[in-house]
Amino acid sequence: MRTGNIFGLRRGAACAAALAAGLAGVPGQAQAVGADGQPARWQGWVQAGGAYTFASPAHWSQLRGRAELAGTGQLGAGIKWKLSARAGYDAVYEGTDFYPGPVRRDQRSELELREAYMDFSAGDWEFRLGKQNIIWGEMVGLFFADVVSAKDMREFVLPEFEQIRIPQWAARAEWFGENTHVELVWLPAPATDRIGKPGAEFYPYPPPLPGLAYDIEGDERPSRRFSNGGFGVRGSTMAAGWDLSAFAYRSPDSAATFYRTVLDAPQPTAVYRPRYDRITRVGGTLSKDFDGVVLKSEVIHTDGRSFTSARTDAPDGLLELRTLDWIAGVDLTPADAWRVNAQVFQRIFLDHDASIGLRKHEHGASLLVSHDLGGGVEAEMLAISSLVRSDWMLRPAVTWKAGHSRLRVGVDLFGGASFGMFGRYADRDRVYAEYRYSF
């Protein structure tokens, strides 16, 4: 495939510039009078960034402008609201034929409503109705107990989590006691992860079968009916300084499962179609601050998820296997201007079959080290690796902050087994830079 002249893209540059200029014209913490006479508050950011993939074949993989605007206010009678939207344009997909047409159309531009909800209360209950983020867990670098969130995985786990998460239409009810919190959620049509199109930088290809050609069809999304909704409950409490929670959530899986069909003509071909099976997840989280050393852990049991199998007798090329995932980490500041986060994690296949290409116990570790160099400059390094095979990601970066501005430059490196979580992207090593202005 060929790479075109991406530096002469007048249309893409004009679009990004107009977007940035329009939003940058909004004054910081801008206020407008709401329906009840209370001021509405508006804030947001504009961002420009580029990434160059230097692994062979070398190519520009991002030249994007993106902006987000969010407003909050009150309608009276104790009703609060939030509204946010995002727009973006990536010139890489305009001036190059390196990517297939479906990829360019999918990732060239975006204009989406992010959050749009109302909050109100009745007694000890608080309610939130509308498009929102529901976050039940958060660790460093990877997702575990964050089971409700759908995610934009077209850039893998490289962007900030706030940009990866996809707000969803939901009804949420929360009850607050003295040391207890109960949360009920219903999602009428849960969103699924955005994985992009085949040929994209981080498309999650299933492993091929030897001797068979390879094809991927369009995904098959869950039908919109009540039984395909998302239903969840979460309870949390404080006990002797421990922040404890437990949850249960049943919904279509936000992550795609690749169903396989083998066609004999005109040539033997394995045809894959992404689908989203209904699964049940039960788990919990804990955290505690030990005089500046914060311990966090999350655990999730998943029932109903299927995994790609090399067995030719496996129905649809899949085996349904129960799993138990857990992660534990500590966050500390060993010296002035230093921060260290270390985590260990594991997936246990409670029903295991060697044909999926994974061990019964898959475990790994991560390490984040950051140091404040002064003058608004911070250096950090994040490393995540399997502990049972060569499969790793390394992300050194430097960030400069001054006032409303932030500049970040870094390198993303991948290596290991060709179908490992990270090794599959070994030819996606890249260097990047991004500038953000917040207002």
Image: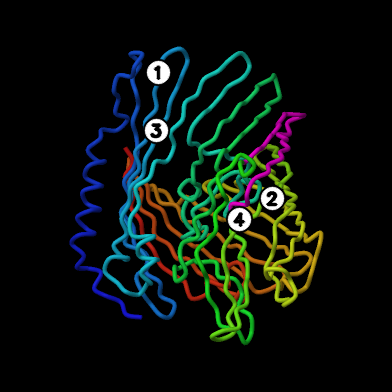
Q: Is residue 232 above or below residue 278?
A: above
Instruction: Decide which of 28, 306 is in the foreground and name it.
Output: 306
Q: Secondary structure at mark 2?
A: strand
Please indicate whether residue 266 sits to the left or right of residue 292 in the image: left
Which sits earlier in the primary sequence, circle 3 or circle 2?
A: 3
List the single residue furthest toward the front. Answer: 265
Instruction: Decide which of 387, 320 is in the foreground and name it.
Output: 320
Q: Between marks 4 and 3, how big is the CA–CA gap?
A: 29 Å
Q: Is residue 203 above or below residue 135?
A: below
Magenta: predominant secondary structure element? strand
Q: Secondary structure at mark 1?
A: strand
| Residue wearing tag 3 | 83
* Of the two numbered discs 4 and 3 in the rendering, the one whose residue sits closer to the viewer: 4
Proximity of marks 1 and 4: CB atoms separated by less than 8 Å: no
Please indicate whether residue 76 sits to the left or right of residue 272 in the image: left
Proximity of marks 3 and 2: CB atoms separated by less than 8 Å: no
Q: Amino acid at mark 3?
A: Leu
Q: Residue at x 78, y 64 (%)?
A: 361
Q: Secondary structure at mark 3?
A: strand
| Residue wearing tag 4 | 276
How busy is the neighbourhood of tag 1: few (under 14 within 10 Å), some, or many (20 plus)?
some
Q: Between marks 2 and 4, how big is the CA–CA gap?
A: 9 Å
Q: Amino acid at mark 1?
A: Leu
| Residue wearing tag 2 | 279
Q: Between marks 1 and 4, how big is the CA–CA gap?
A: 38 Å
Q: Which residues are magenta?
A: 230-255
Rendered location of residue 346, percent (x, y)? 73, 58
